Image (cartoon, rainbow, N blue to C red):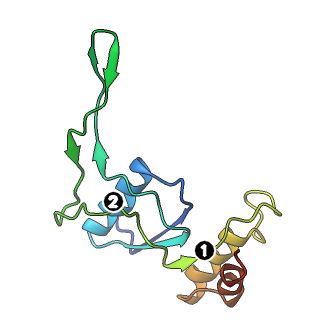
C-alpha cells in the first residue's frame, strides 16, 4: 500500500477484525497510531461446530502478523488515550477522538486536551 502511517480510532469494543488490521499493518512495518481506548484483545478465530442441536465455538487459531506476532489478548494500548465523546456528532472535527487523531497526524504528539480529558475520567 505504501502507507507510512495509519491512524485508528478505537474503544474497548474494538475487537477481532479491527485488531487484525492493526496487527497486520504493524507486521509489515506500517506505523499504526491507536487513538482512544485499549482494544478488547481477540487474536483468536473459530467457526461454529454443531453437535446434537448445540453449537460450540472452539478456538481454532490465533492470528499472527508477518513477524509472527499475535499476543494481544490484552488488547492494543492506545498511542494517545482519549475518552469517547458523545457531545459532538461523528465526523465533527471537534469530537474528542477525531480531534485527537487529527492533532496526532499533524503534530506527531498527543494533544494536551486529550490528555486532560483522560485525567478527568472517574
Q: CA distance from mark 1 to mark 2?
A: 24 Å
Q: Is residue 66 left or right of residue 83?
A: left
- Residue 21 drawn at (x, y percent): 38, 56
**Quadrant assignment, res 69:** bottom left
**Mark 2 lies on residue:** 73
Q: Earlier in the sequence, mark 1 or mark 2?
A: 2
Q: Residue furthest left?
A: 68
Relative depth, front residue between 20 and 108: 20
Identify the image quadrant of the C terminus: bottom right
Q: Is residue 109 left or right of residue 89?
A: left
Q: Is residue 70 left or right of residue 74?
A: left
- Residue 85 drawn at (x, y percent): 74, 65
Can you tell which mark lies on residue 37? none
- Residue 116 drawn at (x, y percent): 70, 86
Can you tell which mark lies on residue 101? 1
Q: Give the residue at x 35% y 54%.
A: 20
Crowd class of label 2 (few under 14; some 14 to 19; many from 20; radius 10 Å): few
Q: Give the residue at x 55% y 89%.
A: 109
Identify the image quadrant of the N terminus: bottom left
The image shows a total of numbered marks equal to 2
> Which type of secondary structure does the marked residue at label 1 adopt?
helix
Amino acid at each position: 500500500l505504501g502507507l507510512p502511517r495509519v491512524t485508528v480510532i478505537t474503544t474497548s469494543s474494538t475487537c477481532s477484525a479491527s485488531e487484525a488490521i492493526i496487527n497486520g499493518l504493524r507486521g509489515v512495518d506500517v506505523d499504526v497510531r491507536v487513538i482512544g481506548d485499549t482494544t478488547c484483545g481477540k487474536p483468536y478465530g473459530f467457526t461454529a461446530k454443531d453437535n446434537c442441536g448445540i453449537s460450540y465455538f472452539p478456538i481454532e487459531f490465533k492470528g499472527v502478523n508477518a513477524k509472527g506476532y499475535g499476543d494481544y489478548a490484552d488488547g492494543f494500548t492506545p498511542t494517545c488515550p482519549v475518552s469517547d465523546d458523545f457531545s459532538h456528532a461523528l465526523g465533527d472535527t471537534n469530537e474528542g477522538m477525531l480531534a485527537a487523531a487529527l492533532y496526532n497526524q499533524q503534530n506527531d504528539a498527543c494533544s494536551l486536551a486529550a490528555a486532560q480529558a483522560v485525567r478527568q475520567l472517574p
